Amino acid sequence: MKIKVLGCYGAELKDFHSTTFLINDTLLLDAGTITSALTLDEQMNIHSILVTHSHLDHTKDILFLADNVIVGENNTSVEIISIPEVIDNLKSHLLNDKIYPDFTVLPTIEKPILQFKPIKTGEPICIDGLTVIAIPVNHAVDAVGYIIRDKKSSIVYTGDTGTTDKIWEEANKLPDLKAVFIETSFPNRLSKLAEISGHLTPSMLKDQLDKLKNPDASILVFHMKPQHLPELEHDLAEIKNRRITTLKQGEVFEF
Ligand SMILES: [Zn+2]
Ligand SMILES: [Zn+2]
């Protein structure tokens, strides 16, 4: 499984972009940073987007991607995949023909450039040879993380979450778990803000990792608030867990 980091921060600043990962060139995890990170040809390759939740830093580039790849009547649709609660939010507040055109009916209702695909938590689906399972997490709005498996490896992607349990129960069932992509947004000093907004601090991250039984999986941290980056890196180093790495944009992983 090849995973490229298109954006890995919890805000938008010069050189720091919001969260999106590209898997095997065709599947996106979230949609905060697509069009500024990929060429038009690379954007045309995308078949599906797994959305964790409706927040704008994870969804805004759905609109700009659709606008770029809508080239004619014979477009192949891009599937927007998530739980029904997230899809309802996207329909009401993003793809509503007011913020921007409703690309679920363009260029034609019969062959739109975007199609919603609702899925149920805990039920595996198959996408481009990968098995994907949505697992509920604990954020300020309805949100899921994803477990993604191919024949060799599994990875866990938390999306945005505060303290949570179910995803660790599921991660502990994976014998081939290679990596956990986990958010850590705020430094320990801002733990109150992290709690009310449904995010993690390094100290809360440590408590989450204590629930993970796999001793070898890489712990790849994303969604750091760039304005607090030095403090976050200091607090993360204090955990003294050699498996933890903070992600950088443009990195490519093979699992
Ligand atoms: Zn969020
Ligand atoms: Zn976010």
Image (cartoon, rainbow, N blue to C red):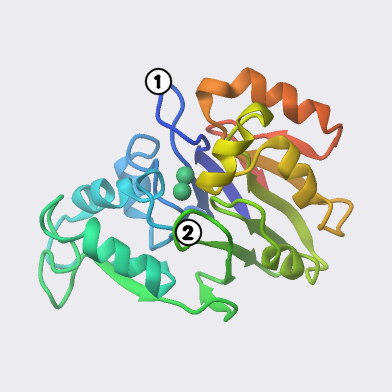
State which quarter of the image contains the N terminus.
Answer: bottom right
Nearer to me, 111 or 188? 188
Picture coordinates of residue 211 (x, y %)? 81, 57
Picture coordinates of residue 66 (x, y %)? 24, 54
Picture coordinates of residue 159 (x, y %)? 55, 53
Q: For the residue marked with disc 1, what is the amino acid?
A: Lys
Q: Is mark 2 within 8 Å of ligand 1?
A: yes
Q: Look at the numbered disc 1 and give the secondary structure of its residue.
A: loop
Nearer to me, 241 or 103? 241
* In the image: residue 120, left or right of residue 176: left
Judge the density around disc 1: few (<14), some (14-19), many (≥20) Cα neighbours within 10 Å: few
From this view, report whether residue 44 is shown above or below residue 203: below
Q: Which label's residue is closer to the chain start, 1 or 2?
A: 1
Nearer to me, 204 or 24? 204
* In the image: residue 47, left or right of residue 10: left
Return the residue at label 2.
52
Per the model, the C-alpha gap separating discs 1 and 2 is 24 Å
Q: Quadrant of residue 245?
A: top right
The numbered dot on residue 184 is none
From this view, report whether residue 23 is shown above or below residue 125: above
Picture coordinates of residue 67 (x, y %)? 19, 50
Q: Is mark 1 within 8 Å of ligand 2?
A: no
Residue drawn at x 54%, y 37% is 193
Q: For the residue marked with disc 2, what is the amino acid?
A: Thr
Q: Look at the numbered disc 2 and give the secondary structure of its residue.
A: loop
Please count the marks in the image: 2
Q: Is residue 249 visible?
A: yes
From this view, report whether residue 200 is shown above or below residue 151: above
Tell me whether the residue at label 1 lies in contact with that at label 2, contact meaning CB atoms closer than 8 angstroms. Answer: no
Return the residue at label 1.
14
Judge the density around disc 2: few (<14), some (14-19), many (≥20) Cα neighbours within 10 Å: many
Residue drawn at x 73%, y 52% is 179
